[in-house]
Amino acid sequence: MKLAITTRTHTGFTHITDLTYKSLIDYSEKCGADFVKLTKSVDNVDSDGKSHYKVLNNYDALEEYDRIVHLDSDILISKNCPNIFELVPEDKVGVVYEDKGTRIEHRKEVMENIQKTFGDIGWTQGYPNTGLIVASKQHRDIFKKINGEFYNGWGEDCALIGYNIVKYGFDVFELSFKWNHMVCFAEEWNGNPFRFDSHIVHYAGSGVFDEHLFREGDRISQIKHDVKTYGDLILGY
């Protein structure tokens, strides 16, 4: 079986990938998978500031590979991270849902909005974050535009892929937040868990876990700090 760890990236992102690719490359080797960078612009949407839609290049990747794990480039992986290919069944899409805690109501609103645009499919819960997606060749269609169009509302690719998962009726293997530990999972409602007790730390959104040290959005400083402080816990360091 041919496996790949894919990640989307673009010009000007090296200030992050210089810090994170070590983790992704080492994890790919650990899983016996190729490391594939998704750099191709999809319908020139980068020109509109929508480089997130490079995730749709996984449609082509799944022509060559039997299974892929898509990981965003702004992540660090714990040394204790298991092989996720062995956890998620081949016939299911593996994702972490983020309509949890303080994000529930807003993500419900996003699900409602995309259905106003593309049609009601009864999607009321289960909003994925596309920083981590496990998919097999049979799931290629989740990486397609909807009726030939992008979704341009808040959430963009997360909303589009979530919509497609439901639209095409694919079964989901819901993963613990420990597989995509973002700031939203580091809050009081979730018990304020330490990020490096998780398998994957994702510096999405504000990207700042230590608000007493860094201002919101200063995720570069946060990543540098984490590599320096917790390097013995991070794969590749």
Image: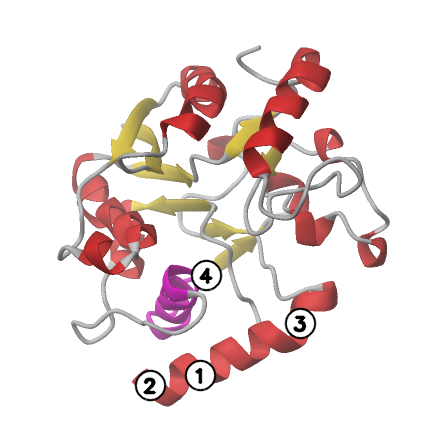
Query: Residue at the location (42% across, 20% down)?
Result: 18
Which mark is in front, 1 or 4? 1
Judged from the image, the secondary structure of the residue bearing numbered disc 3 is helix
Q: What residue type is labelled 3?
A: Ile
Q: Are marks 2 and 1 in contact (CB under 8 Å)?
A: yes
Q: Which segment did they paint magenta?
A: 156-171
- For mark 2, what is the residue? 117
Determine the image quadrant of residue 49.
bottom left
In the displayed structure, does residue 147 sit left or right of residue 74? left
The x and y percentages for residue 35 are 32, 24
Query: Residue at the location (69% across, 11% down)?
Result: 232
Rendered image: mark on residue 104: 3
Instruction: Measure how far apart labels 2 and 3 are at the Cα level.
Output: 21 Å
Q: Which amino acid does label 2 sit on?
A: Thr
Instruction: Measure how far apart labels 3 and 4 are at the Cα level.
Output: 21 Å
In the displayed structure, does residue 117 sit left or right of residue 42? right
Main structural element of the magenta stretch: helix, strand or loop? helix
Membership of 21 in magenta stretch: no
- For mark 4, what is the residue? 171
Crowding around mark 2 (Cα neighbors within 10 Å: few <14, some 14 to 19, many 20+) is few
Crowding around mark 3 (Cα neighbors within 10 Å: few <14, some 14 to 19, many 20+) is some
Judged from the image, the secondary structure of the residue bearing numbered disc 4 is loop
Q: Is residue 72 above or below residue 20?
A: below
Of mark 2 and mark 4, the one earlier in the sequence is: 2
- For mark 1, what is the residue? 113
Q: In which quarter of the image is the N terminus?
A: top left
